[in-house]
Image: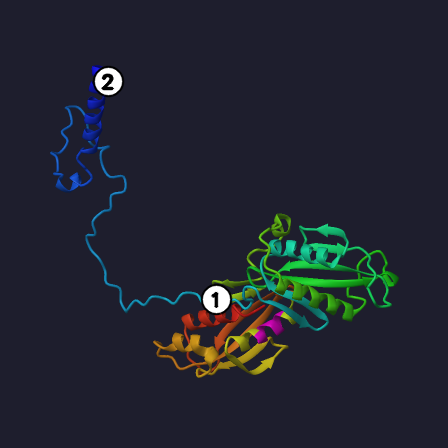
């Protein structure tokens, strides 16, 4: 019994002692420098130095002029998140929306499943889904099938969906160049666009559909003297897209010459869409708000867009670069 009581007393002493240890967390504040390390004879100290020693600056040169921090690139994107649009040019129409082809692929499959369309063939690498033959309900129409094609959009992080319709009476074993019924194509395109607009973006991504997509888009700002826009579109669509972008960027098209690929544009600085231009010209001693926008055909699928001030107008490289970026953001 005595042994047990002694053990309890000793245990209590140990526990109390453990709780009263001194906190050494701030001891470093009273620390003092120790004497330099003295090496034994015969040992060199060449290896004991800072690996990334910063040398002292013996002289410096003051650069001429005043340094100004350049403005960041504008965050412009014509297709906003969650926005779905149907675009049309000539006989072609397509659904334009935010999201890469790999993100849109499972949403397109979801639309077909919900609508009850049988899927006859899929090619995720090329973004193609073909339905089986179906009979339209409630109408005396021929049996039909549809082909959906997802492509990378012009802007990075966007996609375009094209719809093609064929009927059994006109079927030759291969898909036609254009839909047999433009009305049926239009109805299907509108139904798909409505579904995509109403449904939330799917969290899943098709890696096969993403593999063949040009993730950088089809439009690039290339460095040069002067810089220019490289646009991977055929001339007709590039020309129409450029004029649409000029209007959205705040420019007024004063004249155009399609044969020369030129737009003569100006910008009204009092326009709300021209706020970016007023900020740009605020600290510049320049008097110029009229430009020539030139589109040059390189190949059937590649265009260049260049900007220069009109005769008698003042500009500089910074202004030209910002104008190009503003136009680039609205081309779709």
Numbered badge on residue 227: 1
Residue furthest front as drawn: 1
In the image, 290 versus 126, the foreground residue is 126
Instruction: Tell me if mark 2 has few (under 14), some (14-19) or many (20+) residues whose alpha carbon lies within 10 angstroms of its own.
Output: few
Q: Quadrant of residue 254?
A: bottom right
The image shows residue 232 at horizontal and vertical percentages of 60, 63
The magenta span reads 238-244
Q: Secondary structure at mark 2?
A: helix
Q: Is residue 111 visible?
A: yes
Using the image, determine if residue 243 lies above or below residue 5. below
Q: Quadrant of residue 6?
A: top left
Q: Which residue is mark 2?
A: 4
The image shows residue 82 at horizontal and vertical percentages of 57, 64
Residue 243 magenta: yes
The image shows residue 117 at horizontal and vertical percentages of 76, 57
Using the image, determine if residue 50 lies above or below residue 186. above
Using the image, determine if residue 94 lies above or below residue 23. below
Q: Earlier in the sequence, mark 2 or mark 1?
A: 2
In the image, 215 versus 195, the foreground residue is 195
Instruction: Tell me if mark 1 has few (under 14), some (14-19) or many (20+) residues whose alpha carbon lies within 10 angstroms of its own.
Output: some
Q: How is the image coloured?
A: rainbow
Q: Horizontal placement of 132 versus 203: left or right?
A: right
Determine contact: label 2, label 1, CB under 8 Å: no
Q: Residue at x 65, y 69 (%)?
A: 86
Q: Residue at x 55, y 60 (%)?
A: 156
Q: Secondary structure at mark 1?
A: loop
């Amino acid at each position: 019994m005595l042994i047990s009581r002694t053990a309890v007393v000793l245990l209590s002493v140990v526990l109390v002692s453990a709780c009263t240890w001194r906190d050494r967390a701030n001891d470093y504040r009273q620390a003092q420098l120790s004497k330099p390390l003295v090496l034994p004879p015969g040992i060199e100290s060449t290896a004991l130095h800072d690996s990334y020693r910063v040398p002292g600056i013996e002289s410096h040169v003051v650069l001429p002029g005043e340094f100004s921090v350049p403005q960041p690139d504008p965050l412009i994107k014509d297709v906003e998140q969650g926005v779905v649009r149907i675009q049309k040019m000539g006989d072609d129409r397509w659904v334009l929306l935010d999201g890469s082809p790999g993100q849109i692929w499972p949403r397109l499959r979801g639309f077909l499943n919900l609508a009850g369309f049988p899927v006859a063939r899929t090619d995720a690498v090329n973004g193609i889904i073909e339905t089986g033959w179906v009979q339209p309900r409630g109408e005396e129409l021929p049996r039909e099938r549809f082909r959906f094609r997802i492509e990378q959009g012009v802007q990075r992080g966007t996609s375009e969906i094209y719809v093609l319709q064929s009927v059994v009476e006109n079927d030759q074993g291969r898909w036609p160049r254009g839909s047999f019924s433009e009305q049926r194509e239009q109805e299907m395109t509108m139904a798909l666009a409505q579904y995509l607009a109403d449904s939330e973006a799917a969290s899943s991504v098709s890696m096969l559909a993403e593999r063949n997509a040009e993730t950088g888009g089809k439009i690039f700002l290339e460095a040069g003297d002067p810089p220019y826009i490289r646009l991977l579109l055929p001339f007709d669509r590039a020309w129409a897209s450029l004029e649409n972008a000029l209007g959205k960027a705040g420019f007024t098209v004063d004249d155009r010459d399609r044969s020369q690929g030129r737009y003569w544009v100006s910008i009204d600085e009092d326009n709300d869409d021209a706020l970016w231009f007023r900020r740009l010209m605020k600290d510049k001693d320049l008097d110029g708000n009229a430009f020539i926008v030139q589109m040059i055909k390189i190949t059937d699928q590649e265009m260049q867009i260049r900007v220069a001030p009109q005769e008698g107008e003042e500009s500089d490289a910074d202004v030209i670069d910002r104008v190009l970026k503003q136009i680039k953001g609205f081309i779709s």
